[in-house]
Amino acid sequence: GLSAGGLVTPFSARIDPLTSVQTQSWNIVYVTYCTGDVHTGNKVNVYNNVDPANPMTFYHRGDVNSQAIAAWMAKNMPRPSQLLMTGFSAGGVGSLAQYDTFRSALKPTRSALLSDSGPLYMAPRDGTPEQYPSLPLHNTIRDKWGLDLPTGLVTRLITKSPGAGDVNNLGSMNAALAKIYPNDRLGFALFQQDDDFSSFSYEKFYADISGAATDAIRKANTNARWRQDIGPWIDALKPYSNVGYYVPYERTMN
């Protein structure tokens, strides 16, 4: 049974009581979340557990799984005349990060992306957290998820399309896709008042958020950084005619 959370987006349900979209009649391959790495990892880590005597071994295999799914689809399904890669939150990152994987495997006649509420913000390694609030998060996941290892996602993508993006800036992937696939339609959406993805992005890395005296202060400090990250992200999308973005204020149901 589909949980109520599935109704956050009409793309995850065949029949949504609120919204009808064209793709609900298409073949749908739903990739569940996940191995703790927003569909991008390829590394095994041992983490401290609540019980110190029982550390937790975690297999970050999102990138491996994505490649396997794409290969299975190419083998078992007809070549699509149209492909839409979409996801929200963690799936928003995954749909962007794995767009090339699926597009290359399936070779659709027409292809599009809608990355919803899971942005890869600009965060160059030679920047600072004061300039780019997502930088501590990006530096952490690059290590923990093995993104820069020889078998990692960043290494794989930059090897395939050298020069399309900046290996030292995960946020450059947005523009890289626009350059690699100039005839594809690439869409991005997020809420200005997001308090879910933004919490994951900043709370563990900034003391004025994790140690905030009240929830209202936590939200205010979180949102200030989120809005700061939105600006450079939009600026990076603007030059490309095949890219669109939608940044509404908020939605009360979520």
Image (tube, helix red, strand yellow):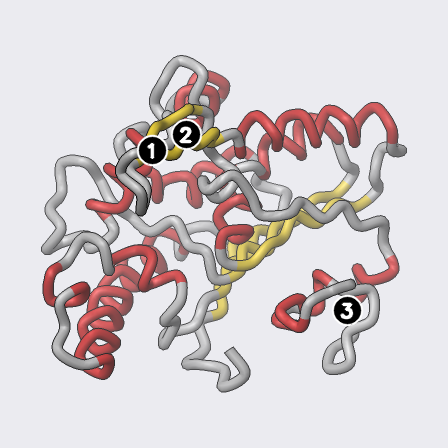
Which image quarter holds the N terminus? Answer: bottom right
At label 2, counting other C-alpha atoms closer than 10 Å, the crowd grade (few under 14, some 14-19, many 20 or more) is: few
What residue is disc 3 on? 21
Which of discs 3 and 2 lies nearer the camera? The answer is 2
Label 3 and label 1: CA atoms lie apart by: 45 Å
Residue 152 percent across, percent down from the top left: 43, 22
**Amino acid beneath label 3:** Val
**Amino acid beneath label 2:** Thr
**Which residue corresponds to the image point at 41% horizontal and 29% vertical from the top-left?**
57
* Labels 1 & 2 near each other (Cβ < 8 A): yes
What residue is disc 2 on? 57
**Which residue corresponds to the image point at 61% horizontal and 30% vertical from the top-left?**
65
- On screen, 67 above or below 224? above
| Disc 1 secondary structure class | loop
What residue is disc 1 on? 55
Label 1 and label 2: CA atoms lie apart by: 7 Å
**Which residue corresponds to the image point at 29% horizontal and 34% vertical from the top-left?**
53
| Disc 2 secondary structure class | strand
